[in-house]
Image (cartoon, rainbow, N blue to C red):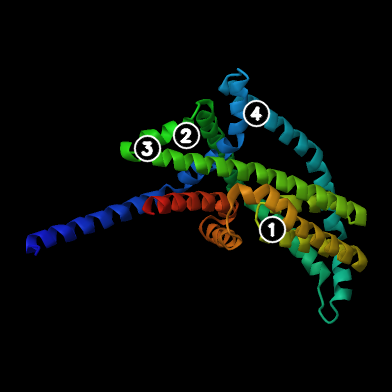
Amino acid sequence: MKSKEQIINIYTEVILKVALVALGLYFLYLIRDIIALFFVAVVVMAAIDPLVSWFGKSKIPRPVGVLSIYLFLIVVIGAAFSVLVPAITSQSKAFVEDLPHYLESLNSILIGININTQEVVSNIGEGISGSSLDIFSKTIGVFSAAFSFIVVLSMAFYMSIIKNGMESFLKSLTPKKYEEKVIDTALIIKEKIGRWMLGQLLLMFVIFALDYMVLCFVDVPYALAIAIIGGILEIVPYVGPVVSTIVAVLIGTFTSPVKGLLVFLFYVLIQQAENHIIVPQIMKKAVGLNPLAIIFSILVGMKIAGVAGVILAVPVATAVSVVIDSYSKDKA
């Protein structure tokens, strides 16, 4: 039978452990922004790692390979912006000019519900004017986002230029007896996240292309802008496609109810092909998560970190699932 002193020691040890865990979690909460940046850097590194490794096998130094990839991406993004931004700007301007006409069309469709078009347009104008008054805070936000972007690219660069850079970093932080398990788990996470990132980019481009072809075929105005919205929203599984469909159908219906119906039918076909052909081929093998788990992770991510949390929800959930799976195998 344990003595009173032993029982006190056990209770003291338990309390200390709980306090240390609580302090550790609080510390992680305080540096959550830094952890998020590091995780994004890991996603970028995992995405470019196969190409960097290929450069290494071709006797091209890893730093040169990473810089070449960065330069290529900058050129591609710059070219895309130079082509797309003027088109999107002109289409957005045309949409604002035609908005009263579209609202009048909506009034005729929604019998009994009166929409004051002048008030809506006036509110949009006031919103734009009001936002311009907040230019200082917006400028600070832009600089903060630019700084975060540079930090992410820098961390991804230094993790990529060293072969097994992430593994070496984790090795320096992990106790000796856990090194092998932690590194094996990290490699699985890196591989899955890399496949997710590449698959997500491919999926966004495929959906953008399909949406654009459908909208041009049906002759819906602002096809390029709507298709780009559809491609971007693909980063939010399940919810994004629904929102993009609503936007496209509404614009089509404003032009002509027949066009709205055709857009709806074509978008349903695209989503069916996406759910049963495109996503299983591109994404299912990449992450292997249950759809319910993905939706739950998106809701949690939205609650914790807003838009950034939604974007990072799937890779974070993937990493957590790999860790849980690894822990379960150890216990078995």
Mark found first going from the N terminus, 4 or 1: 4
State the residue position of label 2. 166
The quarter holding residue 259 reads bottom right
Task: Find disc 4 in the rendering and name its residue.
Answer: 69
From the viewer's side, name the closer residue of 93 and 159: 159
Crowding near the residue tagged with mark 1, few <14, some 14–19, many ≥20 C-alpha atoms within 10 Å: some
Q: Is mark 2 on a helix, strand or loop?
A: helix
The location of residue 118, given as percent across then percent down, is: 82, 68
Q: Residue at x 85, y 52 (%)?
A: 223
Q: Can residue 101 be seen here?
A: no
- Answer yes or no: do the residues labelled 2 and 1 have beta carbons within 8 Å? no
Could you tell me how far apart the alpha carbons at marks 4 and 3 are, in whole angstroms? 31 Å
Instruction: Give the number of the mark in front: 1 or 3.
Output: 3
Crowd rating for badge 3 (residues with CA inside 10 Å; few <14, some 14–19, many 20+): some
Q: Residue 179 carries which label?
A: 3
In this rendering, would 144 be left or right of 102?
left
Q: Quadrant of residue 144?
A: top right
Secondary element under disc 1, as helix, strand or loop, is helix
Q: As displayed, is residue 171 above or below residue 308? A: above
Q: Which of 284 and 223 is in front in this view?
A: 284
Per the model, the C-alpha gap separating discs 2 and 4 is: 19 Å
Work out whether mark 3 precedes mark 2 in sequence or the reverse, and give the earlier one. 2
Task: Kindly state the secondary structure of the residue where label 3 is placed.
Answer: helix
Q: In which quarter of the image is the N terminus?
A: bottom left
Can you tell which of label 2 and label 4 is closer to the viewer?
Answer: 2
Residue type at mark 3 is Glu
Q: Residue 240 — which label?
A: 1
Quadrant of the drawing holding the C terminus: bottom left
Q: Which of marks 4 and 3 is nearer the N terminus?
A: 4
Image coordinates of residue 135 in percent, x first then y, are 63, 48
Pick whichever of labels 2 and 4 is earlier in the sequence. 4
